[in-house]
Amino acid sequence: MSIRMEMEKSPLIAVSKKIKKANSLIPGVRQWGLYVLSLIASDAIMTFFAFSVAYYFRFVLFVRFFDQDATVSFATYQFLLITMPFLWLVIFAINGLYIKDNLLGGTQEYSRVFRSATTGFLLIVIAGFLGPNLVIARGWLLMAWAFTFVFVVIARFFLRRGVYTLRKLGFFLTPAVIVGANQEGRWLAEQLQKWETSGLHLVGFVDKKTPVTFPLFNDLVSLGTVEQLGEIIERYSIGEVILASSAISTRDYLLEIFRKYGVSERVNIRMSSGLYEILTTGLTVNEFAYVPLVYVNKVRLTGTDTILKFMLDYVLTVVGLIVLSPFLVVMAILVRISSPGPVIHKRLVMGLNGKQFNAYKFRTMFVNGNEVLKEHPELRDELAKNHKLKDDPRVTKIGAFLRKFSLDELPQLFNVLKREMSLVGPRMISPQEVSMYKQFDMNLLTVLPGITGVWQVSGRSDISYEDRVRLDMYYIRNWSIWLDLQLLFQTIPAVLKSRGAY
């Protein structure tokens, strides 16, 4: 059977047919137009609802129970209730919340919503300060600001989930090619294929050496050479061209691609970070003698980011320790009476910039665990490969319960107070595991390890070690305070489901 016939049966060709079918029903441009219209309608409704709920709380409930003698200018607030949604839509538009490139991109979209709601809040404050006849209740305004952010984000969250579902049917997908079939190009393909909600449908590679239709990675093939890129873009309706920078050895090729397609409205040109992706996760460009030079940051978070993460860690950790202290005492007693040995187990792990420290956990194993494991030689290979055992004979009964709901990790809150860990971060690893991160080991050590993280809410021990590495790298590259809040919110149901916890 020929390669071309094999291609006809590949899952990628099936996806291509889904895209064509979806575009025959609703053209791609109209799909995004309908989505933007849905966002505008949703934002307008949610903003009006937010201001109305704030009005009800401040001028109905509050007045009824606490301030019955208060006088309210209903005309003023009725005017604001009607006009504010339109002002908010303008602010959202100015902040790029209806531009395709800023949509469906994770927590960055929610960050823009927060900035927009805050901008509108400040504009009303300024108007109230400058307008002598405009008196606005501060409680109403604060609640309106908070409700606007919460309601708009919730609505956008569900709209996004709707788009993710439609992508499985071929809607909202953009055909893409990777220029360069070297190791970096294949790494890019692997990550993009596993990110099912990215909206990119990889058609194949463009490579100057590999023969056309030659299979390269999974179901992806070589579609042609760099010189044939224009023809490939037309033939496959390519919307995204991703350049594996290390695969393009000559500068002329790169410049030629940007000359032809860099300003095209039909195609987006994106270039991987190449070597910089391996060295670090943050770059700064400074000029010396009018020469722009790239500076490699030693840590991932700097400036305001560090302060925000520090505040989030300390506020929630202090509150958490106060609330959980009775439960911590009970768990410590149960561990103590379940089997002989210390209550707290100290595990040597890697910290920021390679500094090693002892991470605290409730002891969940028998103290003679190594002797117990000797009786099960078949489990040694599994332990060496995954650093985890699904049915571990060394674990005590109370230890199994603590592990199931991740309660054994609660003492790590003290590591957070010592600034050795963060509430959210990549999975902590032992010094022996560093080599398993291969070229990404330096990236991993640019942030504090976390009690929870992307790995924790994505299946924990049920996912492969390679996927754990990929999830850690995703977190480091895409960190924002909103991503931390999202992961903290997702941790609760993940722990209750206890999937992959052992």
Image (cartoon, rainbow, N blue to C red):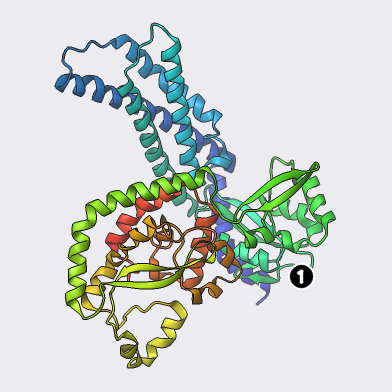
Q: Residue furthest top?
A: 133
Relative to 340, say whether 94 is above or below.
Answer: above
Camera-side residue of 278 and 298 = 298
Mark yes or no: residue 268 visible.
Answer: no
- Find residue 5 and report its horizontal and vertical position in percent: 64, 70
The structure residue drawn at horizontal position 34% and vertical position 91%, both measured from the top left corner, is: 376
Instruction: Give the image quarter of residue 382.
Output: bottom left
Residue type highlighted by circle 1: Pro
Q: Is residue 3 left or right of residue 21?
A: right
Residue placed farthest to the right in the image? 252
Q: Quadrant of the C terminus?
A: bottom left
Does residue 290 sit above or below 431 in this rendering? above
- Residue indicated by mark 1: 211
Query: Which picture quadrant has residue 453?
Result: bottom left
Q: Position of residue 30 (x, y in %)?
A: 56, 38
| Residue 252 horizontal side relative to residue 392, left or right | right
Residue that extends furthest to the front in the rendered view of this protein: 418
Identify the residue at image location x=67%, y=64%.
185
Badge 1 marks a residue whose secondary structure is loop
Identified at 77% across, 61% down, the residue is: 248
Q: Which quarter of the image is occupied by the N terminus?
A: bottom right
Residue under the image location 36 percent in, 35 percent down: 151
Residue 198 screen position, x and y as percent: 53, 53
Crowding at dot 1, Cα within 10 Å, few <14 / some 14-19 / many 20+, comes out as some
The percent coordinates of residue 308 (x first, y second) are: 45, 44
Closest to the observer: 1 or 461? 461
Q: Is residue 389 visible?
A: yes
- Nearest the viewer among 438 and 44 is 438
- All told, the count of numbered labels is 1
